[in-house]
Image (tube, rainbow, N blue to C red):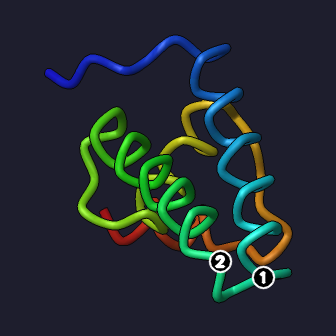
Amino acid sequence: MLLLPDKALLAGLLQRYRTWERLVLAQPNNLARRRRLEDLAYTLCVLMGRRTAREAIIAAELHLGLSRSDGSAAEWAQDR
């Protein structure tokens, strides 16, 4: 049985991840920003029990009941 994280904690992590993702996209050569994004990605992976940041984000969105406009969460859930 997988223990899932608190939804408020998870929502905050997702929000921080997306903020840092935008910052990295704005300045892709900024190593400090990239490291922070990678740290957040790792934390999401550990909390959600997933191997990649993409899988962790989709799992987190499903856990929070969020829907993705591109439909990838639903497709991902069907593949599992």
Indicate the secondary structure of the residue bearing disc 1: loop
Residue at figure coordinates x 59%, y 17% from the top left:
9
Q: State whether residue 21 is above or below residue 19.
A: below
> Residues at badges 2 and 1 in contact (C-beta under 8 Å)?
yes
Query: What quarter of the picture does the C terminus occupy?
Result: bottom left
Where is residue 24 drawn, in percent x and y? 71, 74
Indicate the secondary structure of the residue bearing disc 2: loop
Residue at figure coordinates x 36%, y 71% from the top left:
79
Q: Describe residue 69's horizontal placement relative to residue 73 as left or right.
A: right
Q: Name the residue type under label 1.
A: Gln
Q: Name the residue type under label 2.
A: Asn
Residue at figure coordinates x 78%, y 77% from the top left:
70
Query: What quarter of the picture does the N terminus occupy?
Result: top left
The quarter of the displayed image where residue 71 is located: bottom right
Where is residue 46 drawn, in percent x and y? 27, 40
Residue at figure coordinates x 82%, y 68% from the top left:
22
Report, in whole angstroms, how far the alpha carbon at label 2 lies from the one at label 1.
Answer: 6 Å
Label 1 crowding class (10 Å Cα cut-off): few <14, some 14-19, many 20+?
few
Q: State whether residue 69 is above or below residue 40.
A: below
Q: Nearer the viewer, residue 29 or 43?
A: 29
Q: Describe residue 41's horizontal placement relative to residue 2 as left or right.
A: right
Which residue was labeled with disc 1?
Answer: 27
Which residue was labeled with disc 2?
Answer: 30
Q: State whether residue 69 is above or below residue 56.
A: below
Q: Describe residue 78's horizontal placement relative to residue 28 as left or right.
A: left
Q: State whether residue 51 is above or below residue 19.
A: below
Where is residue 42 drawn, in percent x and y? 35, 51
